[in-house]
Image (spheres, helix red, strand yellow):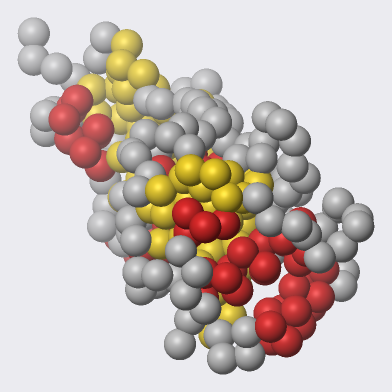
Amino acid sequence: MQIITLLSDWGTRDPYLASVKGQLALRLPEAQIIDISHDITPFDITQASFVLRQAFPNFPEGTIHLIGINTEASIETPHTLIKYCGHYFIGADNGIFNLLMSGEEAQQIIELDLMQDSEFFTFSTKDLFIKAAVFLATGTAAEALGTVKTTINTRYSFLPVKDGNVLKGKVIYIDNYENLITNITAQQFESFGKGNPFQVLFRSSQYRIKRLSTSYSDVSEGEMVALFGTHGFLEIAINRGTAASLLGMSVDDMIRIEFQFPQ
């Protein structure tokens, strides 16, 4: 059974999601359609790439992922199909593929060359991406759907910066519990800090945490906690609380980790 996932910024109030699911049911009734999220902040491909990167490895290889965010095509951002880690991703090449792969290489890159099923050009997910997905699911080779390419558009994400004894990062995502997920990975933390004492500082050093935990309940209810979540990034949370609101933090706010290195 072919699995097709959907990721978009449509929400659920408008008819867009139902229209796409209806067309998939008509054209590929045997497919299993799974929603990743439709609550992406409108046009935010950085947020979308984070959600997709965390979700897609949990699906079997061969899964087709339709990305309904900033889908209008142009010469600079053509409709594109990539194969990465055995999965197929269909969307506009607006930088999201580059952010998704985080510097790794795609197995295939195809600029789609298909006639869409409507004379309107504002709903590419329904009018073109589904068509490409149906071809793939029914055995058409990816390279038959367009022009083979070797590059995609590059969009750089902010990487943690080393400054003396400080590792500087930022908040890249706030989840539904208002936990603050940063761009600092466990590997970066361990490689830079080498087991030395540290403190995590944010809001211009107004708040600080001096130890890592393994779960939210390692601290008392209402206290701040720093840990590496299942996504592998440093996370700031409040046990049974909403960190983003209570700490006044937003996406792109800076996080600093100061290490005490031996003299």
Q: Is residue 95 visible?
A: yes
- In this view of the protein, which residue sits in the foreground, 23 or 67? 23
Residue visible at 62% across and 50% down? 112
Q: How far across and how far down the image is residue 40, in percent?
A: 67, 55
Q: Name the side, left or right, on which 187 lies relative to 200.
A: left
Image position, residue 206 (x, y; %): 51, 27
In this rendered view, identify the residue nearer to me: 218 or 15. Answer: 15
| Placement of 103 over or under 39, stated as above or below | above
At x 72% / y 61%, what residue is drawn? Answer: 128
Q: Quick one: which residue is furthest to the front in this view?
A: 144
Residue 231 appears in which quarter of the rendering? bottom left
Name the residue at 8% across, 8% down. Answer: 263
Visible in this render: residue 89?
no
User: Residue most toward the right?
Assistant: 119
Q: Is residue 253 left or right of residue 70?
A: left
From the top left corner, tell me how far across and down residue 244 is, in percent.
60, 46
